[in-house]
Image: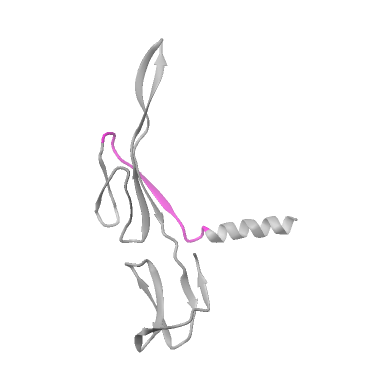
Amino acid sequence: QKYFILALLLCALAASAHAFCYRKEVKLGMTHCVDDADGTIHEVGSSWRNSKCMDCTCSGCCTGYVFINRRMHLFVTSVSTCDCFLYRYATPRDFPDDCVSVFDPVACEYIVHKRDDNNTLCDIYISIGK
């Protein structure tokens, strides 16, 4: 049973190895987020995939109320954030020697094709990641 739990933990660790995220706080009242990767502007509540193949969201600000001395006061419970998470894609590691691996930044995926013919796709034996 110990080995099963260890194997499960190692699988979970491997699944998250290529992933990372960052959170950027924005000012109260802002109506948009600016993506640091490419400078694009996105409205609060929107989601997008940026030029670095990261999935991003721009979330709004939340407010709340608190009673102090029996009086209700408005306060900010959290600020707006612009979160980006790395879109996990499989990285080819083993394929025929007469082939080459090329990253397609539009599709956010690797394509493996013959070195001398971009239209002939190759088999991938081993990939790492999603």
Q: Is residue 44 above or below residue 50?
A: above
Give the main secondary structure, helix, strand or loop, of the magenta stretch: loop
Q: Quadrant of residue 38?
A: bottom left
Magenta span of residues:
16-29
Q: Nearer the viewer, residue 53 or 37?
A: 53
User: Which percent across, then down, holds residue 77?
Assistant: 39, 30
Residue found at x 26% / y 34% = 29
Colouring convention used in this rendered image of the protein: one colour
Q: Is residue 74 magenta?
A: no
User: Which percent across, then down, holds residue 113?
Assistant: 40, 82
Q: Is residue 19 magenta?
A: yes
Residue found at x 30% / y 40% = 26
User: Which percent across, then down, holds residue 128?
Assistant: 51, 69
Q: Is residue 24 above or below residue 62?
A: below
Outermost residue, top side: 69
User: Which percent across, then down, holds residue 19?
Assistant: 46, 57
